[in-house]
């Protein structure tokens, strides 16, 4: 590497060549480089958290197996519930494995929001996606606004099939950019005094995060709606093949399975 060239500038050059005409990615690199320099990528999970991280990823796999059985039997509400649980447990495994959140922080009824907040505010994903993808920010905004607004939670729960597929396509777009950016940043790690003996987990696991945050933002309202029959507008019997998430969930599962494999490989 030419020592006379600023690492972030060299990374921008690589990104420009890969994505000609996408000027927003320049801001992405600036945001990520500043984040890295400020934080020094210093999260460290203790041994208990590391073990629990893998346990959560294993439980997510079991939830996927449960979902598939229930879906094949057309018990759609419980199938969606187990899918949502698998996403949530995968997110917990991610946060614990990297030391982003503590064991105490991942407990409680607001877990999906704690996870989304932890993943976005503490990993650099927020800076990365806000700069490169306006729609990524839009989906997250919908999730935040739904926290204390039942109608907005219903809106996410009833998300049309076409919109879910659009979000899945955005995962592909985000992953393509993130993989290239992380690849470049891994090579630059030594230049900003980060231990470069092995690629930092904070970089190598970000592609999986691109899947988890979208799946989490789309699925979290189903934790309640799939189980309780006391809401007249969204009850378990409303989960039929016409509902967007019921129709889309086999495709969504492919993204989750890929993310779980990546996390197990990196965190084990």
Image (spheres, rainbow, N blue to C red):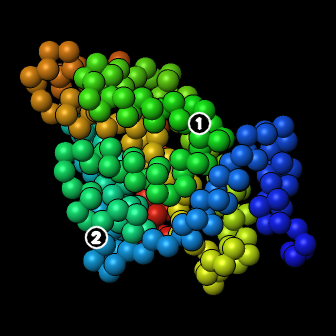
Left or right for 192, reference 94: right
Q: CA distance from mark 2 to mark 1?
A: 30 Å
What residue do we see at 46% from left, 63% from top?
A: 263
Residue 39: percent from left, percent from top: 54, 66
Q: Which residue is mark 1?
A: 170
Disc 2 designates what residue? 52
Mark 1, other Cα within 10 Å: few <14 / some 14–19 / many ≥20: some
- Quarter of the image with the C terminus is bottom left
Task: Determine whether the residue tagged by mark 2 lies in a helix, strand or loop.
Answer: helix
Query: Where's residue 101, x and y in %?
Result: 35, 62
Name, please, the residue furthest toward the left: 230
Q: Earlier in the sequence, mark 2 or mark 1?
A: 2
Question: What SS does tag 1 mark?
Answer: helix
| Number of marks in the rendered image | 2
For the residue pair 57 and 62, the one nearer the viewer reads as: 57
Q: x and y percent of residue 110 in the render? A: 24, 44
Residue lying furthest top: 233
Asked if residue 8 lies left or right of residue 90, the reply is right
Q: Residues within 10 Å of mark 2 (few under 14, many from 20)?
A: some
Q: Quadrant of the N terminus?
A: bottom right
User: Compared with residue 24, is residue 96 higher up or lower down, i.e. above or below?
Assistant: below
**Residue at figure coordinates x 31%, y 38% from the top left:** 220
Note whether residue 14 is visible. Answer: no
Residue 221 vs residue 191: left or right? Answer: left
């Amino acid at each position: 590497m030419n020592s006379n060239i600023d690492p972030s500038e060299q990374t921008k050059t690589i990104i420009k060549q890969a994505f000609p005409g996408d000027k927003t990615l320049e801001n992405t690199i600036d945001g990520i480089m500043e984040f890295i320099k400020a934080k020094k990528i210093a999260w460290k999970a203790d041994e208990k958290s590391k073990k629990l991280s893998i346990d959560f990823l294993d439980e997510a796999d079991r939830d996927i197996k449960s979902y598939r059985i229930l879906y094949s039997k057309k018990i759609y509400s419980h199938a969606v519930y187990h899918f949502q649980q698998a996403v949530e447990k995968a997110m917990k495994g991610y946060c614990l494995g990297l030391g982003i959140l503590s064991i105490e922080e991942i407990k409680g009824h607001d877990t999906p929001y704690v996870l989304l907040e932890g993943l976005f505010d503490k990993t650099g994903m927020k800076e990365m996606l806000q700069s490169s993808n306006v729609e990524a920010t839009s989906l997250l905004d919908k999730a935040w606004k739904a926290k204390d607004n039942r109608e907005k939670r219903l809106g996410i729960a009833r998300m049309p099939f076409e919109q879910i597929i659009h979000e899945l396509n955005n995962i592909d777009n985000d992953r393509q950019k993130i993989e290239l950016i992380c690849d470049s940043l891994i090579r630059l790690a030594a230049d900003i005094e980060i231990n470069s003996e092995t690629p930092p987990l904070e970089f190598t696991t970000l592609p999986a995060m691109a899947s988890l945050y979208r799946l989490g933002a789309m699925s979290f309202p189903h934790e309640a709606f799939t189980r309780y029959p006391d809401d007249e507008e969204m009850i378990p019997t409303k989960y039929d093949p016409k509902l967007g998430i019921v129709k889309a969930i086999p495709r969504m599962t492919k993204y989750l399975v890929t993310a779980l494999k990546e996390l197990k490989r990196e965190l084990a």
